[in-house]
Structures are given as structure tokens and as C-alpha cells.
Image (tube, helix red, strand yellow):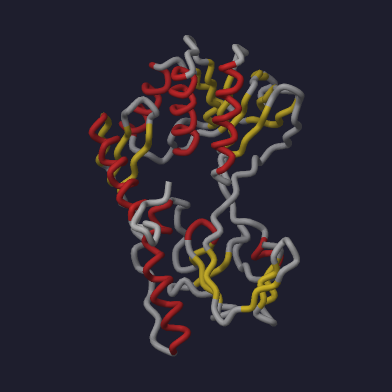
């Protein structure tokens, strides 16, 4: 999408087409562009973890290098949940490709899973180190020439780099004059509705929920879906809107370790094991089945 003309109620697409609307809801996610300068180099590749298609491209890149017998040194930049899952699954991917000693380095900034309970941080750290990953505390200042230069002057070489240093909304809303938030997200009220343009709604990572800033976690997008559907219909038919109230942070979180195990967190409670991964898999599959194609066959 190239832009939003809120005055004319028109969406402008990148191919030049225009789509008019009476009401519109945005769920365009977020971007994970690095917060430091990045310069590519021959033979190396850099993949931000969002948009999600980058992960498929990174997987194919790693597989092709491993199949060719080339060394594959993977660097993951970030210490959050996404960085942990990417690092754990990179280890599993390399092992599955027959690499005997996977080379995965994780630059964790101030630490791994900051803000999580101590037990979760320890389990995550042990999971990566046990399988051969190297954790490096520090901040990446720039990436150039197939090396990540840290703020302390040291450097780390890589063949494939995945960056997970935080997310931000696309520039679409700020450029269209629809954001009141520092991060550029679509500003919405308790009804997930723009206070500037009441015919605009939104949910997930692309919004700034003015009543209470929310973590960028998929659970909130899922919770907001039914409210958005109800409020779009209510707006178009002149009925009362429903506020979004499920803003609590004691939600179930499950991190895929990449080795058949998962770390489960619910408030202060933390568990780890294969049964946690079975719970995650069941939840994910049930969610996907809810979007079955008209034939009744779930999308692949």
C-alpha cells in the first residue's frame, strides 16, 4: 500500500490502483528493521525477522549453503523472544542439514529475555548453550563486510545474519497524517477506532492503543479480531461500539526452543519440556484450522 487519502476515503496501492471505502480496518503488522547501519557484502546475507517471509528466505539460504558443503556461520542479533526462537531453530536447521558443529552466535544486548521471569531466562540460556550456541553480551553498532561491529570495538563474522532488535509499525500512517504516536502506529481509542477518522479501525502490531500501550505480541491481535469485526459492523449500521478490554499481560506465552521443547510462561509460572511444545503445536494448529478454505481443507 502506498498511502491513505483520509479526506477522499481512498486507499492508494503501489501499483497505482485506488480503492474507496466507507470503513476500513488495518492489520498490516510491523517491521523489524535494524536500528544500526547495515551494509551488505558479497557472500553474506542479512535478514530482519519481519516481515515473516524473510525467515523462509533465510532458511532456504542456510539450507543451500549447507548442501553445498560451505561453512555456515549464523549470527542472531537481539535478546528477545523472537531472537531466542530464531536462534534455537537455526541450531535445529543446521543439525538437520548434517552440520556436526552448528555455528550460531547470539548478540543478546543486555541479556536474553529481559523482563521475563528468572527461571525462563535460565532455561532459554541453557537451551541455546547446551546445543552449541555462543551468547555475546553487547550492542551491535553497525554491520558491514560480513561482520557485525560491536560498540566495544570487537567484531563478529557471519555468513547469514538474522536481526531481531525490536519492531515498529510501517511508515504508512505517519506519512498519511493518521498517527499521534511516537512510533508512527495508527492511533486508536478503546474501540480500536481512530480518534481522527472514526471510519478507520486497526489492530495488532500496526496500532498504538492510546488507552494503554500494549506489547507487540500476537495474542493481542487475536483478541482484537472479534472486536474489530463487531465494531466495523456496528459503525456501518449505526449501532453502539464495543470497547477492547483484554489488555492484561498475564497471557500464555510459548517459545519454540527448536529441539522439540518449548518454554511456557503464564504470569510468574514457567515450565519447559516436550509437553509444552505439544501444547503450542495444538494451539497453533487449532488457530490455523479456524481459517479453513471453503472446501473444508485447511490452508497449507
Q: Which residue is drawn at the image coordinates 72% and 22% (left, top)?
A: 43
Please state which of residues 12 and 257 is positioned toward the viewer in this rendering: 12
Residue plotted at (54% across, 79% down): 23
* Image spot of residue 103 (x, y percent): 53, 16
Residue 3 is left or right of residue 293, and the answer is right
Q: Residue at x 61, y 30 (%)?
A: 139
Q: Quadrant of residue 190?
A: bottom left
**Does residue 288 show up?**
yes
Out of 17 and 23, give the one closest to the viewer: 17
Tally of marks: 0
Residue most extreme to the front = 295
Residue 149 visible, this orientation: no
Q: Quadrant of the N terminus?
A: bottom right
Give the x, y percent position of residue 93: 47, 24
Residue 56 lies, with reference to residue 18, above or below; the image says: above
Residue 157 x, y percent position in the rendering? 66, 18
Q: Is residue 297 left or right of residue 12?
A: left
Q: Residue furthest top?
A: 100
Residue 58, position in %: x, y? Answer: 58, 32
User: Looking at the picture, does residue 255 appear above or below residue 284?
Assistant: above
Task: Name the residue: 31% across, 40% down.
Answer: 281
Amino acid at each position: 500500500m502506498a498511502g491513505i487519502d483520509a479526506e477522499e476515503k481512498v486507499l492508494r496501492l503501489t501499483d497505482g490502483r485506488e480503492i474507496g471505502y466507507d470503513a476500513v480496518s488495518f492489520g498490516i503488522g510491523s517491521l523489524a528493521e535494524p536500528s544500526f547501519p547495515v551494509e551488505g557484502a558479497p557472500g553474506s546475507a542479512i535478514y530482519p525477522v519481519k516481515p515473516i517471509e524473510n525467515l523462509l528466505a533465510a532458511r532456504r539460504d542456510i539450507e543451500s549453503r549447507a548442501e553445498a558443503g560451505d561453512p555456515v556461520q549464523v549470527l542472531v542479533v537481539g535478546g528477545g523472544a523472537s531472537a531466542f526462537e530464531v536462534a534455537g531453530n537455526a541450531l535445529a536447521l543446521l543439525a538437520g542439514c548434517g552440520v556436526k558443529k552448528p555455528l550460531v552466535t547470539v548478540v543478546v544486548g543486555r541479556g536474553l529475555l529481559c523482563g521475563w521471569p528468572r527461571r525462563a531466562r535460565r532455561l532459554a540460556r541453557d537451551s541455546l548453550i547446551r546445543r552449541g550456541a555462543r551468547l555475546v553480551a553487547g550492542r551491535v553498532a553497525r554491520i558491514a563486510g560480513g561482520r557485525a561491529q560491536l560498540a566495544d570495538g570487537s567484531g563478529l563474522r557471519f555468513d547469514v545474519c538474522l536481526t531481531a532488535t525490536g519492531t515498529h509499525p510501517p511508515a504508512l500512517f505517519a506519512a498519511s497524517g493518521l498517527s499521534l504516536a511516537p512510533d508512527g502506529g495508527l492511533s486508536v481509542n478503546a474501540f480500536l477506532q481512530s480518534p481522527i477518522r472514526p471510519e478507520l479501525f486497526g489492530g495488532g502490531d500496526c496500532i498504538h492503543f492510546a488507552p494503554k500501550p500494549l506489547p507487540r505480541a500476537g495474542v493481542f491481535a487475536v483478541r482484537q479480531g472479534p472486536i474489530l469485526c463487531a465494531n466495523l459492523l456496528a459503525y456501518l449500521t449505526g449501532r453502539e461500539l464495543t470497547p477492547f478490554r483484554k489488555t492484561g499481560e498475564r497471557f500464555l506465552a510459548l517459545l519454540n526452543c527448536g529441539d522439540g521443547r518449548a518454554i511456557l510462561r503464564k504470569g510468574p509460572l514457567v515450565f519447559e519440556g516436550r509437553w509444552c511444545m505439544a501444547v503450542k503445536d495444538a494451539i497453533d494448529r487449532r488457530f490455523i484450522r479456524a481459517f479453513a478454505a471453503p472446501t473444508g481443507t485447511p490452508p497449507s
